[in-house]
Image (cartoon, grey):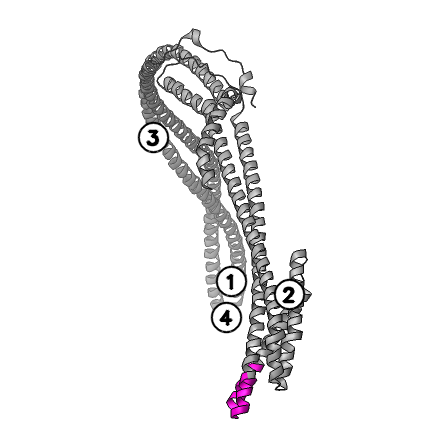
Amino acid sequence: MLGIESSLPSASRASKRRSSKSFRPNLKAASGLKISTLLMICMGLLLLLIVAVGGLAAYYLQQSGDSLRTINRQADRSVQVLQLNNNMMEARVSLMSAARFYQEAGIDNDANLVQSADNAVIMATQKLDEVRKAFADIRSNMPTEPELRRLAMGLVASYQAYLDDGVEPMVQALETRDYSTFYFVSEGFGVLRAATFQFRIEELSKFYNDLADQLLEQAELQTRVANTAIALGLLLGLIIIVVLRLVLGRTALTPLREAGVHFDHIANGDLTKKITYRSANEVGVLYDAMRRMQQSLQGIVLTVRQGVDEIASGSSQIFAGNTDLSSRTEQQAAALQETAASLEELASTVRQNADNAHQADQLAHNAAKVARQGGESVGAVVNTMNQISARSGQVADIVNVIDGIAFQTNILALNAAVEAARAGEQGKGFAVVAGEVRSLAQRSAQAAKEIKGLIEASQNEVKTGTQQVASAGDIIQEVVRAVNSVTTLMSEISSASQEQTAGIEQINTAVAQMDAVVQQNASLVEEAAAAAGSLQTQSETLADAVSQFKVQEGDVIDMSERDYERLH
C-alpha cells in the first residue's frame, strides 16, 4: 500500500500533463456542446464509474467475505478435530485414573476410591460417546476436496484403529479388572494407535491452518484489489470533475462573467458596447437574448427620446386647456347654482299654490255637500207642503161636511120650530130649543164658511209656497251641479298642481345633480390640470433620465432569430 500511495502524486501529475495536452484542443470543440448535454455526459461517466467501481468492489468484497466465511468454517472444523483429540486424551486419562483407583480400592477396600473410579469410567464413557458422535458427523459430511477428503479418511481410519485396538480393549480389560492386559494394551497398541491418531490430527489441523492462511491471503488480496479499484475510481472521478471544471470554465463561467460586465454597462446606461460572443450552448442563447435586449433597449430609448418632447408639448397644451376648462366649469357651476335657487323658489310657490288648490278643493267638496244637504232639505219641505196641502183639502172636505150638517140642522131646527108653533103652548119650550139649535147651526155654518175661506186661503198660500219651494229646489240643484263642477275643476287643478310640483321637484333634483356633476367635473378638471402639470414635470424628469443612455443608431445590432431558435 505504501508503494501505491507514493506513486499516486507522480502518476497524477503525469496524467494532468497528458490530460492538459490532450484536452486543450478539445475544449474548443466541447464549448459548442450544450451545457445540459455536457453535464449529462459527465454525470453518465460518473454514474458508469460509480457502477463499475461499486460492482468491482462489491464483487471482491463478496469474494473476500466468502473466503472469510470459509476460514470460519475451517476453523470450526479444526476446533472440532482438536476437540476430538482432547476428548480421546481425556477418555484415555480417565480410563488410566479409573484403573489406578480400582487397584488402590482393591488393596485398601476404600469405597471412595471405587466411587472415583466409577466416575472416571463414566467420564471416559461420555467423552467416547462425544467422539463417536463427532466421527459419525464427519463420516456423514465427508468433504469433497480430494486432499481434505484423503486426510479426513485417514483420520477416521486412525480413529477406528485407535478405538478398536486401544480404547475398547482397555475398557474391556478394566471391566474385568484385568489390569495387566489393560496396561499392556495401554502401553503397547494404545501408545502406537494414539501416536498415529495424534499424527492424523496434527496433519489435518495443519491442512486446515494452511488452507486458512491461503484463504486469508486471498481475502487480503481481494481487499487490496477492491481498495485499489476504489482509489482508481476516485482518481478517475477527480479527473472527470477537473475536466468538467475546465470545460465549464471556458464554456460557461468566463462567458457568464463577461455577461455580468455587459449587464453592468447596460445598467449604467451604456448601450454602445457590442456583444461579440457566440456559441451554440445555453450561454450562447443567453448572449443572443442579451443582444436582442440591447437592441430593444436601444430602440426603446430612441423612441422614448422622441416621445418625451411630444409628451412635454402635449402636457403643456393639456395644462392650458384644462385651466380654461376649469374657469368655464366654475362659471357653469355658478349659473347652475343660481338656476337651482330660482327653481327652489318656484317649487316653493307651486307647492303653496298646490296647497291652496287642495284647500279650495276641500272647501268646494264641503260646499257641494252642504248644497246637496240643502237640496235634500228643500225636497223634504216640498213634500211637507204637499202633505199640508193634502191635509188642508181633507180639512176642507170635513168643513163642507160640517157645513152640510149645519144646513141640515138649520132645516131641522126650522121644521122643529114650525112644529112647535103648531103645537102651541106645549111646543114653546121645544121652539126655544129649536131656535137655539138653529142659531147654533147658523153659527156653525158661518164658522164653517170662515174656516173654509181660511183653508182655501191656506191652500192657495201652500200652493204658492210649494211652487216657491220647488223653484228653490231647482235652484239648489243647479247650485249643487255648479258646485260639483267647481269641485271637479278644483280636483283637476289640485292634481295638476301636484303634478306640477312633482315635475318641478324632479327638475330641481336634476339641476341639483347637474350642479353636483358640474362641481365634480370642476374638481376633476382641477385634478386634470394638476396631473397635466405633474405630467409636464415628469416628462422633464424622464427626459433627464433618458439623456443618461448612450445610444448610437449605427450600432443597433440586427440579429436573426435563427440563433435563438436552434436550441428550442
Q: Which residue is mark 1?
A: 417
- Given residues 30 and 457, the one toward you in this image is 30
- Label 4 crowd (10 A; few <14 / some 14-19 / many >=20): few
Q: Which residue is mark 4?
A: 426
**Mark 4 belongs to which amino acid?**
Gln
Counting from the top left corner in percent of width and height, residue 387 is at 50, 50
- Label 1 crowd (10 A; few <14 / some 14-19 / many >=20): many
Query: For the residues marked 3 and 2, what is the alpha-carbon distance in whole angstroms?
Result: 144 Å
- Given residues 345 and 511, the one toward you in this image is 511
Query: For the residues marked 2 and 4, what is the alpha-carbon distance in whole angstroms?
Result: 220 Å
Q: Which residue is mark 3?
A: 348
Q: Which of marks 1 and 3 precedes in the sequence?
A: 3
Q: Which residue is mark 2?
A: 155
Counting from the top left corner in percent of width and height, residue 227 is at 51, 43
Query: For the residues marked 1 and 4, what is the alpha-carbon distance in whole angstroms?
Result: 12 Å
Dividing the image into 4 quarters, which one contains the C terminus?
top right
Magenta highlight range: 100-121
Residue 45: which quarter of the image? top right
Q: Which of marks 4 and 2 precedes in the sequence?
A: 2
